[in-house]
Amino acid sequence: MMIDRLAGNAALKDSIRLMLGSSRLTHSVLLVGETGLGAGYAARCVAADYLYPAGGAPAEALLRGECCRAVGKAGDRDSGRIETGVVREAISVTGMGSGGRYLVSQVKAMRTEIFNTSLSAEGRAVLLYHVERMNEESANALLKVMEEPPEGVLFLLTADSAGVLPTIRSRCISFAVAPVSPEECAQWCIGQGVDKKQARLYSELFDGHIGTVLAAARDDARREQVEKALTLAKAAAAHDSYAAAVLLAGYEKDKAAAAALLGDFRAVAAAGLRGCTSTPLTADAARRALSLADAAIQRLAAQVNPKITLSVLAAKLG
């Protein structure tokens, strides 16, 4: 089964196997887990096992996310449409509005599509990612179809927090997607072709968050950002405010990039607190850096000028 490919999470996998094997899988499943833990991957595994019990090429394509996609335009309620993918039996919906919010037009397009004749013997699967980003309007549009779904349609929802609207959560059976150990994470990522050294380093830094490790290992810009976060950590460990200021100066005009760097710097500091030997920050130095990173991230989120935020951080790291 495809669900067996999910690392760790034995209880979750056992429950899914049991429900699929006895044909008692509810029509709506909610998978909750922090970003990077693989809730989206887990949802695709369940969808693949539901639609294609024998596996094969369609199941592999679904795991890669090569399914149909509900899209729309902000401000235009009638702009929703379905983009055809390799796997026609599965539809994915990811928020396209400001901040990744769902558009009503996307939900309406999905709803219209799934009331068409099913394309496989098993039915259809709808993958809704990050449903914590749904507002009341888009949630109401979804509820209309979740309350009386077409026969054979399985809804698989993911969320990276508990902030899912109660009206949505109450109609689903919920499972938590848990992190795996850094060792297990590294082995899994090595099996996906990640360099051994990188897999072990990133698995420690990101505490078993497989999706985060894969994203860092497979993207040159992301790897460079992690290296800069480690360099910033070295400056913090040495109380070198000048080196910190030089590095951070390159982010003063790009708030999004600054927030991303600070997120990785925070991960490095947190890894130091867990006893990770790959970070220059340990004990009290790691605790102090973590506190400063959190404060800087909060300042950026509060619309404080990035230049001021980073200048204050650099000075305090000295």
Image: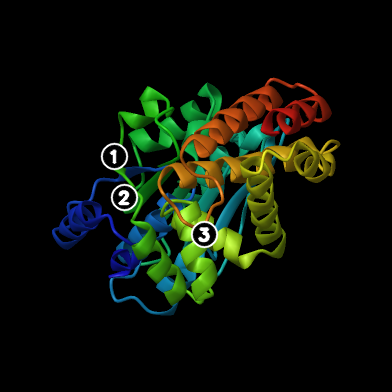
Residue 216 is situated, as x and y percent measured from the top left of the image, at 59, 59
User: How many discs appear?
Assistant: 3
Could you say which quadrant of the image residue 294 lies in?
Answer: top right
On screen, residue 298 above or below 215: above
N-terminal-most mark, 2 or 1: 2
Measuring 39% from the left and 70% from the top, which residue is drawn there? 187
Which of these two is toward me, 40 or 287? 287
Horizontal side, residue 42 vs residue 99: left or right: left
> Callout 1, which amino acid?
Ser
Residue 304 is situated, as x and y percent measured from the top left of the image, at 76, 21
Q: Which mark is residue 174?
A: 1
Residues under numbered marks 2 and 1 in contact, where contact means CB atoms less than 8 Å apart = no
- The residue indicated by pointer 3 is 202
Which mark's residue is nearer the viewer, 2 or 1? 1
Circle 3 — which element? helix
Circle 1 — which element? strand
Dot 1: within a 10 Å radius of its alpha carbon, few (fewer than 14), some, or many (20 or more) residues? some
Which of these two is toward me, 143 or 41? 41
N-terminal-most mark, 1 or 3: 1
On screen, residue 249 above or below 57: above
Measuring 51% from the left and 58% from the top, which residue is drawn there? 278
N-terminal-most mark, 2 or 3: 2
Which of these two is toward me, 185 or 233? 233
Alpha carbon separation for disc pair 2 and 1: 21 Å
Horizontal side, residue 219 vs residue 119: left or right: right
Horizontal side, residue 59 vs residue 87: left or right: left
> Callout 3, which amino acid?
Tyr
Residue 88 visible to the viewer = no
Q: Which mark is residue 217?
A: none
Residue 19 is situated, as x and y percent measured from the top left of the image, at 18, 54
Circle 2 — which element? loop
- The residue indicated by pointer 2 is 151
